[in-house]
Amino acid sequence: MTEMMTAGIELMFIGMGIVFAFLALLIVMINIMTAIIQRFFPEEPITATVPTSALTSHTDVGTIAAISAAVHKYRNKHK
Amino acid sequence: MTEMMTAGIELMFIGMGIVFAFLALLIVMINIMTAIIQRFFPEEPITATVPTSALTSHTDVGTIAAISAAVHKYRNKHK
Amino acid sequence: MTEMMTAGIELMFIGMGIVFAFLALLIVMINIMTAIIQRFFPEEPITATVPTSALTSHTDVGTIAAISAAVHKYRNKHK
Amino acid sequence: MENLSSLWESTGLYNFSGPQAFMMLVGFLLLFLAIKKGFEPLLLLPMGFGAILSNIPVAGIAEEGGILYYLYFGIESGVFPLLIFMGVGAMTDFGPLLANPKTLLLGAAAQFGIFSTLLGALALNLIPGMEFSFKDAAAIAIIGGADGPTAIYVASKLSPELLGAIAVAAYSYMALVPLIQQPIMRALTTEEERKIEMQQLRVVSQTEKIIFPLMLLTLCAVLLPSAAPLVGMFCLGNLMNSCGVVERLSKTSQNELINIVTIFLGLSVGSKLSADHFLKTETLGILALGAIAFCIGTACGVLMAKVMNKFSSTPINPLIGAAGVSAVPMAARVANKVGLESNPHNFLLMHAMGPNVAGVIGSAVAAGILLSLVK
Amino acid sequence: MENLSSLWESTGLYNFSGPQAFMMLVGFLLLFLAIKKGFEPLLLLPMGFGAILSNIPVAGIAEEGGILYYLYFGIESGVFPLLIFMGVGAMTDFGPLLANPKTLLLGAAAQFGIFSTLLGALALNLIPGMEFSFKDAAAIAIIGGADGPTAIYVASKLSPELLGAIAVAAYSYMALVPLIQQPIMRALTTEEERKIEMQQLRVVSQTEKIIFPLMLLTLCAVLLPSAAPLVGMFCLGNLMNSCGVVERLSKTSQNELINIVTIFLGLSVGSKLSADHFLKTETLGILALGAIAFCIGTACGVLMAKVMNKFSSTPINPLIGAAGVSAVPMAARVANKVGLESNPHNFLLMHAMGPNVAGVIGSAVAAGILLSLVK
Amino acid sequence: MENLSSLWESTGLYNFSGPQAFMMLVGFLLLFLAIKKGFEPLLLLPMGFGAILSNIPVAGIAEEGGILYYLYFGIESGVFPLLIFMGVGAMTDFGPLLANPKTLLLGAAAQFGIFSTLLGALALNLIPGMEFSFKDAAAIAIIGGADGPTAIYVASKLSPELLGAIAVAAYSYMALVPLIQQPIMRALTTEEERKIEMQQLRVVSQTEKIIFPLMLLTLCAVLLPSAAPLVGMFCLGNLMNSCGVVERLSKTSQNELINIVTIFLGLSVGSKLSADHFLKTETLGILALGAIAFCIGTACGVLMAKVMNKFSSTPINPLIGAAGVSAVPMAARVANKVGLESNPHNFLLMHAMGPNVAGVIGSAVAAGILLSLVK
Ligand code: NA
Ligand code: NA
Ligand code: NA
């Protein structure tokens, strides 16, 4: 019983340690990746290949509608 | 052979009996259900229940994001 | 080794022979089929065959129901 | 040249047996019925094709290692027919039934087609060359339920060797419903009866449509659990559709999932159309019994409707009784059509949909009875 | 009359045991929560239905030969949760995370909900009637990851008997995220902190979105291969969507495939809601621990965000820390909502999506740790 | 601290072997080719990803209990490639072939790529380090068929260990068809020949399109039953599409079903890209032989077309002969493109579709011959 608790506490420290270490390393890697890409492969004309998934493309419709609605409302209010 | 026929005839009577009993009971139950629903839960505005879930809600995220972005932009412009 | 090569060469001749024989026979069969169809079953109006089935026809039910309801209503009004 | 002779020995021509060739012709006949005659093409086309594929000699497409062998596991396990039943449930609207629940009795009466066919199959044992066990008889009887997935499910449990013939009979007669039912309906009703107009159905609320499948399932669990797999999957599909909160699941079960399973089911049923299972005197018996089952079911439905019309406060057109055999929605359309001939202002379709889906429930119940009592 | 009595003995009424009836009620409760309360209906509806079906006596729907028995193999093999994870990956946009990578730390902090729950489960062993092995404790802990497929995957590997209770707890609390998180978020933050506005996120290029899943997978392969099945399938889905060249595969994985698997997964998980596995004192412990896990995860996320806000050059609103538990996208929406109450011009949603998907990665990593160290 | 060291021993870093790391790089290379170069991305992307996943140490994703292990059963049983073939059949229009049936001979000639490669593989045994059995040689030869599902089907039956390398070679060269074929086509034809205009194709009736797949299947059943699984599933798909009565099945087989199976097939093929199977001298031999096979097939097609042009009453542009290798529809497009360069008013695309689908039939026939004669 106490043995299991000890093991549990040990696992807790090791576990959280690894989770933090892993995600912190990922932050470093992302920053490196972004730096490399922005320097050597700068922003291509993206809109050529746009990911369109069934769900996200619905969003686009919604998005445009929302933008238009929001801007419209805002403008009306601040006339 | 005749034994099988006897069993078959018995099964026929039992079977039809159960089918009728089951469906007749279902009629009674439906009538009770309808009475209860019409009395205690009268015709709601049907469109009330809207699905909300991890899978279906990506659209909403996009929409709100779009509004937020649009308003943000607009505000900055009109400061 | 040489045995395998011999078998390979044999397979090559047999194989190409069969491929050609099979496809040549298919040419003959196509020509016969086309001749028969053009003589005895000349170009039908293609849209003839319409799917009818349990699975696809739910719409039809709805359609007929709608017509039926509409006609019913109309009759009642113009009595 | 050893290769050449071994090649010749591997041709179909060398290996064809007469029965196999005949069964391939049966497959082509099913394709013809499906494509040119429009007989239930969604099932008869893959089924016919499966019959052709499984009877090609040497290829072993339905034997261990072949694709049809693996697909057949979906039938053996009951998974395929139950998934189809779920999809059908999602396509079904219980509204007309809930608006006029007494039409459930019409669906009950039509099941006499099942039980009388059971007797018929047992009686056929008197004819030399026919030999049906009690299980075989029960599996054949279910053809009278006029419901494809139910027939396949029951046959796969009680009498897998007859599965091919039973499925062919069930789907063929379902396609023939207009031809089979009309003369019976006309013979058993008077012109006056066929002219009867029925009261318009009330609107059924969504709450009722949500509660009903749950109530049906509960009743089934309490009284007839052996019917629960069939009734349960049907109710699941129906609930997914009527509740309105899982639209994407409901749509998938009505479209892609049921389509995929239909292809696989058809092919695997076709693989049971092998010469040694199908080319028997018994098959003729099955085909004959199937036709009789449909006739008896139709007649009982119509007669029941006539009786109910006598005692009912609201008028009931006896024609809608014929829809009690299931065969959704053809039987309901036939009732509508025959009704229109007598009274061009009388639209029976929605009234016939009640007994029509009642017939589905009725035959699932009958299937449960057979599965639980026939051992 | 032998038949009649054997029929009576085959009814559910004769065979029902109290616990089975109770579990069916649990199933109906889940359906009620799914349909009327809108609790994660896509999973709770099939799960509740599966619970009902598997507790019907005699029918044996979840026993050998029944459909749920066969479907359950998709969970036992890990295939169903991994395919769902692939579909979720295809729906996920890593853009907000890549624009502000330090939010990954918020996703890390929230995993403390997992490891503290592990301790809690072990501590519960002190209470008589509760008996959790180390594996059980780890499986329960994963509820704190607030991620359905991850929880099911881990539970199926470590503690299949608890799978039902764990899945119910995980999905129920995910649906309850708004109720659970808001008071904690308010208690741990000041009005001033909730008003903090964050800088608009930069646009992330497609190249970054293509490289990131591959980088994540590589890191996982090198450092924590036991998390590779989960992380790998997630990255596959994400890559299919972001690369733009396999649109048809991406769409299918986000729609038909995930829908089909969701139906099957829900039914099979429900089949683990059998009386003998669920009706134990332990289940109450699991439900309590699950709630605590969500609370601790939320609190840690918020506190971590407060610490980061102290040291960061750009302001960080502590509310977005709560999104680190995953529960995509509800947790992010809650952060947005609470933020709007304090500052109606402050839209936190996109900022909260970063920690939100970080939470998914974090709990997959934690799952890998549990799978590799708990034996 | 025992845990820490056991954790270290469970990392990929500790367990990586050089070959595994190399195979992961091969996986990344395939992803690069798929995403950046557009090489057959629908298959190379999942295949590359499968290669990465299956070479992650410790995780055991392709070993018993891992998802790729279970998915691979779809290849072992032949179900996946056959379902893909069914979908491809549903997408295929036999119209151009039926309008000009003699182009079938072009599809026959191009199969010389298969049989000459068989000889080449046997000859490679002379080189030390290469060791191909007769079965291996036949499996490699099928690369010359330029048809993905056929290659995977045959390789899975004759030489499963080489499956990964064969699939990679087949799909890579199919993507490279424009590069490989153009110089050969130009070298073997004169400017005058490339300018040849062909007569417009007649309209083919629906009846012919319905009868043809059935006729093809019958011929195959009678003469070459070992090709019947491939030809049969192809004809089933084609019939479902051309008959017009099962549109929903046809659409599902062309979309959701083929998409799902493509993801699974790609992943499972990738799981055969393990270090011990792929990192052998033999792989280099396979890659070299594959390229040669495509060249020989193209050349034979073009030469056959030149011969036919001599004897034919209507003119035949030799460029369409190159389309006989299959690689639908790239090869036909290449023929069209090269033709347009010489004569900007000459649209060969539809004319090249005839030999193109003839090539599919031809390689399925060749596959049947190999499967029946190589033991
Ligand atoms: Na029925
Ligand atoms: Na999480
Ligand atoms: Na070819």
Image (tube, coloured by chain):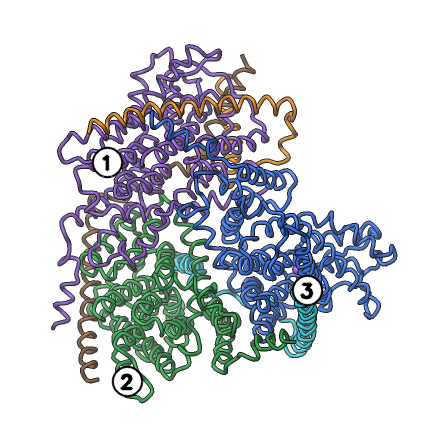
Chain colours: A orange, B brown, C cyan, D green, E purple, F blue
Q: Secondary structure at mark 2?
A: loop
Asked if labels 2 and 1 touch by Cβ distance under 8 angstroms, the answer is no
What residue sits 37% from the left and 17% below the top? E304
> Which residue is nearer to you in this view: F146 or D71?
F146
* Rendered image quadrant of residue E41: top left
Residue type at tag 3: Thr
* Rendered image quadrant of residue D70: bottom left
Q: Is residue F351 above or below residue E332?
A: below
Visible in this render: residue B44?
Answer: yes
Q: Look at mark 2 in the image and give the residue it sits on.
A: D125
**Tag 3, which chain?**
C
> Which residue is nearer to you in this view: D65 or E249?
D65
Residue F253 picture location, percent across and down? 52, 57
Label drawn at residue E321: none
Q: Look at mark 1 in the image and give the residue it sits on.
A: E133
Location of the C terminus of chain E (image quadrant): top left
Residue D297 picture location, percent across and down? 30, 74
Q: How far apart are the two marked residues, 1 and 3, measured between alpha carbons?
A: 66 Å
User: Circle 3: is it few (<14), some (14-19), or many (20+) Cα within 10 Å?
Assistant: few
**Tag 1, which chain?**
E
Ligand 1's quadrant:
bottom left
Q: How far apart are the two marked residues, 1 and 2, measured between alpha carbons?
A: 62 Å
Describe residue F85's horizontal placement relative to residue D300 as left or right.
right
Describe residue E283's horizontal placement relative to residue F144 as left or right.
left
Q: Secondary structure at mark 3?
A: helix
Total numbered badges shown on the rendered structure? 3
Q: Look at mark 3 in the image and give the residue it sits on.
A: C2
Residue type at tag 1: Ser
Q: Nearer the viewer, mark 1 or mark 2?
A: 1
Do badges 1 and 2 share one subunit?
Answer: no
